[in-house]
Image (tube, rainbow, N blue to C red):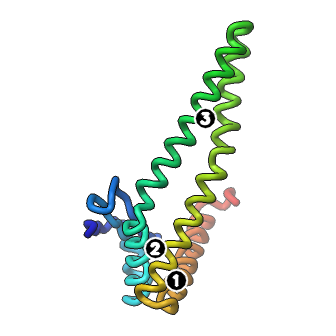
Amino acid sequence: MPEVWLYDSPDPNAFATGPSKNNSMVAVSTGLLTNLNEGEVRAVLAHEMGHVYNGDMFTTTILAGLMNTFVYFISRIVYRQVAERNPMLGIGVYFFLQIVLSILAMIPISWWSRRREFSADKFAANTVGKESMISALQAIDRGSNRSSTSIRRKMPWRP
């Protein structure tokens, strides 16, 4: 069973972290506890437990590590080829590839992450009922919109 931690934030949020199912932690914001009812909080906790149960933290970390390794090695290989002829161009190509390949690497990571979120949603819906899960998602959306509106008021120059 993961440890449960509380952190101070007005935003309704929760997340699971840890290297394994047996060594994990679920963090819950004060904003989540303030803005959601008991059934909605249970749904959010069930969602996070879905991540723990499915080992999502570990697999997502492995995927991100593999993608970062891919970006690094491809950039280094091309850098060495170019730098032999033109060291300054090699450095530019290296940084350019780091940026472009990192952006491209986000595609499979985002795809995987989205699938894991849907799986955790399904786990929560099966555990506490789909009505509680739907209500929790709607409450979090309302809370997130409230928070972003507050930020826009404080920083009107931001979109």
Q: Quadrant of residue 83?
A: top right
85 is higher (above) or lower (below) than 114? above
Q: Is residue 20 above or below residue 36?
A: above
Compared to 7, does 100 lie above or below? Answer: above
Secondary structure, mark 3, is: helix
Which three-letter amino acid code belongs to the residue tagged 2? Pro
Question: Which residue is the site of mark 2?
Answer: 12
**Residue contact at pointers 1 and 2, CB within 8 angstroms:** yes
Q: Look at the image and tell me in which quarter the C terminus lies.
A: bottom right
Label 3 – label 2 distance at C-alpha: 34 Å
Which residue was labeled with disc 3? 71
Q: Is residue 131 above or below residue 55?
A: below
Q: Is residue 130 left or right of residue 41?
A: right
- What is the CA distance from the residue labelled 1 to the residue labelled 2? 8 Å
Camera-near label (3 vs 1) is 3
Q: Percent from the top left, x then y, of residue 37?
A: 41, 88
